Image (cartoon, rainbow, N blue to C red):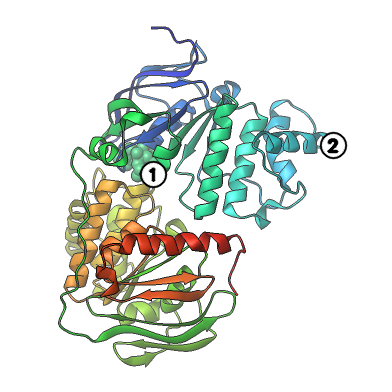
Amino acid sequence: MTNANHIVVAEHICKSYVGVQALDDVSIRIKEGEIKCLAGENGCGKSTFVKIIAGVESCTSGTIQINGKNLTKHTAKDAIDEGIQVIFQDLSLFDSMSVADNIAMNKLIKEGKPFTHKKEIEKIAQDALSLIGVEMPLDTQVKELSIANRQIIAICRALALDAKLLFMDEPTTALTKNEVDSLLDIVLGLKKRNIAVVFISHKLDEVMRIADSITVIRDGHKIGDFSADELDPKKLAFYMTGREVNYQKYERGYEDQQNVLEVKHLSKKGNYQDISLSVRKGDILGLTGLLGAGRTELALSVFGLNKPDSGEIYFEGNKVEINSPEDAIDLGIGLVPEEREAQGLFLKKSVNENVAAAILKRLKGFMGNIDSNGSRTLSKEAIEQFRIKVYSEDTIISTLSGGNRQKALIARWAASKPKLFILDNPTVGIDIGSKAEIYEYIQQFAKDGIGVIIISDEVEEIVSNCNRVVVMFNGEVVKEYTEEEMQVPNIRQQINELVESGKITEEGGQQA
Ligand SMILES: Nc1ncnc2c1ncn2[C@@H]1O[C@H](COP(=O)(O)OP(=O)(O)OP(=O)(O)O)[C@@H](O)[C@H]1O
Ligand SMILES: [Mg+2]
């Protein structure tokens, strides 16, 4: 077979880590100017493939040709020299340097040029920005930019180095709806310039919108290469998981009508204002709207991490002051935070220690007696229940795939048996099959009388799981759907339309 027009021809790639076969005989070809999506469940090997082609990790066996050259054991520098660039999730930008400096830096370093000619630096930056049709002040410090704009800088930095192939591993997880639209447009624009993009996302609608071809991987094996028009999200989900994925709709059946949480007229300047809402035992309350609507800030306030300016919080009927996460945990509040890496996991510790962390305080002194049989049994159960893909409960959590880390975090809070369980965008980065399992688990929680709040941008997630829904824009509640209203047949469409209408105001930026 001819390899003409292929940037990458990877054949029979295997990669094993201790106890894990991350990739097993995977062959993937990437053509010039093609948008290829890699799809598959958490831990199936997508990020591993990216790292191998980018020269960050080497494969155990197999061969790799890049631009027709045999480069199997290549380094990251070799890959860059061949025009391969990865937009890593942390973006690796220099915060206190300007937009222009960040875009031009790698090119100047590569060419061994001094970092002094402002005109040249600005020209490199401007050319790269023009390539994707974005305008941005060149002298702004990168730390002042939104995540979406930082991502654009990282893309431009790659383009300045004459990228022919760009890997984007879950680039949309932290973006608002409008920003996702712009990013997908940029990706389509790159294709027009004959730059190939390998795009990874668990949001199958994004995949369907841009993909030319989709390679499905399951448990380290390639299931197949498909052209985008032979798939729809349902079929794709089937190939990814090997089964039909359906979400059960939640119905509250709990007798006790007591409020677990009630907030009255809660306000915090710049975050949210005059919020009143309640959660009964057995309620799953959905908080939707758009990224930046003030939902996360509200959740952090209930968890003692963001002191409100005014208003009242009642827990099980009693007025409470929640001044720290310890106060919240003592009351029986659990929070799966939005910023998992920063606020959630102990990355250098094992799965066991992470899962056990939330209950240890109850069992014994915090972080004491960490190897007790109790915590070990619990971690093993959690690994099984959430299908966390891991060699053993002693594995260090940072070696888990993104989605599996997230599952461990949910498992940890679930293990603490909270009375109020707040989950902030819990399934970002979680594959479609595991989502169904997590939903089932959360619903069982609520059936047992726990009050649950799910913050989510995904209307489907909200409609399947929540018996009541509150929509927030710009720090304010704009609509509340009662239990009865959630029963109407076109509720999904109603909520969708309302949320979409918020996109217009979203550009206006932050809250009151
Ligand atoms: N450094 C490592 N040490 C041990 N195991 C690893 C290491 N890196 C990856 N793995 C394992 O390899 C497998 C594939 O992981 P990978 O990150 O490629 O998955 P993924 O498809 O990107 O999943 P996700 O959708 O959750 O991001 C996982 O089981 C993971 O735990
Ligand atoms: Mg990954």
Q: Quadrant of the C terminus?
A: bottom right
Side of 2 where 192 appears, left or right: right
Front residue of this view, candidates 471 and 426? 471
**Mark 1 in CB contact with mark 2 (< 8 angstroms):** no
In the figure, 171 relative to 444: above or below?
A: above
| Amino acid type at image mark 2 | Lys
Instruction: Please give the name of the residue rendered at 33% of the width and 83% of the height, measured from the top-left corner.
Output: 261
Q: Which residue is mark 1?
A: 205
Categorize mark 1 by other alpha carbons within 10 Å: few (<14), some (14-19), many (20+).
few
Q: Residue placed at 34% from the left, 51% from the top?
A: 405
Residue in the image at 68% along x and 51% along y: 142
Which quadrant does ligand 1 occupy?
top left
Looking at the image, the residue that sits furthest to the top is 1
Q: Quadrant of residue 92?
A: top right
Residue 47 position in % (x across, y down)? 40, 37
**Which circle, 1 or 2, is nearer the viewer?**
1
Query: How far from the left and from the top, in percent, is residue 240?
Result: 27, 37
Answer with mark 1 or mark 2, whichever residue precedes in sequence: 2
Residue 224 spot, x, y in % from top left? 29, 26
Q: CA distance from mark 1 to mark 2?
A: 42 Å
Residue 105 seen anywhere in this rendered image of the structure: no
Q: How many marks?
A: 2
Question: In which quadrant is the N terminus drawn?
Answer: top left
Give 448 or 459, whichever is nearer the viewer. Answer: 459
Q: Is residue 23 above or below residue 97?
A: above
**Amino acid type, callout 1:** Asp
Residue annotated with mark 2: 119
